Image (cartoon, rainbow, N blue to C red):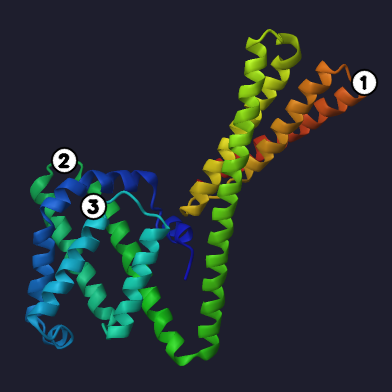
Amino acid sequence: MRPFKEIKANYYFTKEDEARLSELKPLMEKRAEKVVGALYQWIIQTDSAKRIFKNESLIKHVMRLVRTWFISLFSGRYDNYFYDTLIRIGQKHEKVGVDPHFMTRAINIIRNACVDILCEEMEHNREKYLISINKILDINLDIITSAYLEEEIKGYSPAYRIKIQLVRYGEIFSQVVSLVLIVGLSIITVAVTYLCGKDIYEILSGKLEQTIVTALGSVLILWVMLELLNTEITHLKGGKFKISVFVGVALVTVIRETMIATLKHETIEFITSLIAAILIMGIVYWLVKKTEEDRR
């Protein structure tokens, strides 16, 4: 399976699309029965579909699941949990023998129902909302179908099954390490907060000249720790990994060291070397940051 970030990028699924879909949530929740009803009518009128959904109670159970899935399309949250849910849908379809054709046809019915809803409810600017709906439906179909085919291949290839298990264990290990890293960063952030508070207390106690520089350095380190923590949390949710944050850590550390060296009256050569390091790291930080922004 391709990473979710790559799939969204290939469909040009942007933050604007997420916001538009989120705006539609109240409307689609209100009109969800129309969508589910359209799919229900197709199932009961199609012989090949009726052979899979053998009784009315099963059809109603599936329709409840479809309703929940449909509303989730407009949740505004398209993270790893959303991605994993779609993978499980594809895997379940393969296990119960639902042909990918039926999923493709179901998406087509749901797409048409959404078009009808927007035409009935919106007079202006409906085109951009339709584009966002088409994107999320295509992404769903892509992931569910890919998961279905991957699950099917596993049944024929023992080597492929081993490969998938290794990848899955690797992903689990990566998630655990990320969680440990977040806990570690949280502990360090608390410690830096304590040091910062201690420096501020000494300033208020009258030791202004001795501690104001170290207090400012502690504040800079605290700011960087919060950035690191937020970056790791975002990455854990499926967001982009920002190298610029780590360059920023090095830059702030050297800045703090320069401030302390100035206070301690270190040699001019040592202070000059720190300033040169700041200049180089500043250029590197700007180049990395610019590259990250260009890739958005």
First in residue order: circle 2 vs circle 1: 2
Q: Indicate whether 225 appears above or below 83.
A: above
Residue at 39% x, 75% y: name it: 147
In depth, the one of 38 and 78 nearer the eye is 78
Q: Verify CB contact (< 8 Å) between mark 3 and mark 1.
A: no
Q: Is residue 172 left or right of residue 75?
A: right
Visible residue check, residue 294: no
* Mark 2 surroundings within 10 Å by alpha-carbon count, few (fewer than 14), some (14 through 19), many (20 or more): few
First in residue order: circle 3 vs circle 1: 3
Q: Amino acid at mark 3?
A: Leu
Instruction: Residue under label 2, please give it.
Output: 124
Q: Indicate whether 47 appears above or below 21.
A: below
The residues bearing labels 3 and 1 have C-alpha atoms spaced at a distance of: 66 Å
> Which element is circle 3 on?
helix
Q: Position of residue 195 (x, y in %)?
A: 65, 28
Q: Is residue 100 left or right of residue 272?
A: left
Instruction: Residue under label 3, please give it.
Output: 130
Q: Position of residue 16 (x, y in %)?
A: 35, 43
Q: Is residue 112 left or right of residue 289?
A: left
Q: Amino acid at mark 2?
A: His
Residue found at the far front of this picture: 205
* Mark 1 surroundings within 10 Å by alpha-carbon count, few (fewer than 14), some (14 through 19), many (20 or more): few
Q: Nearer the viewer, mark 3 or mark 1?
A: 1
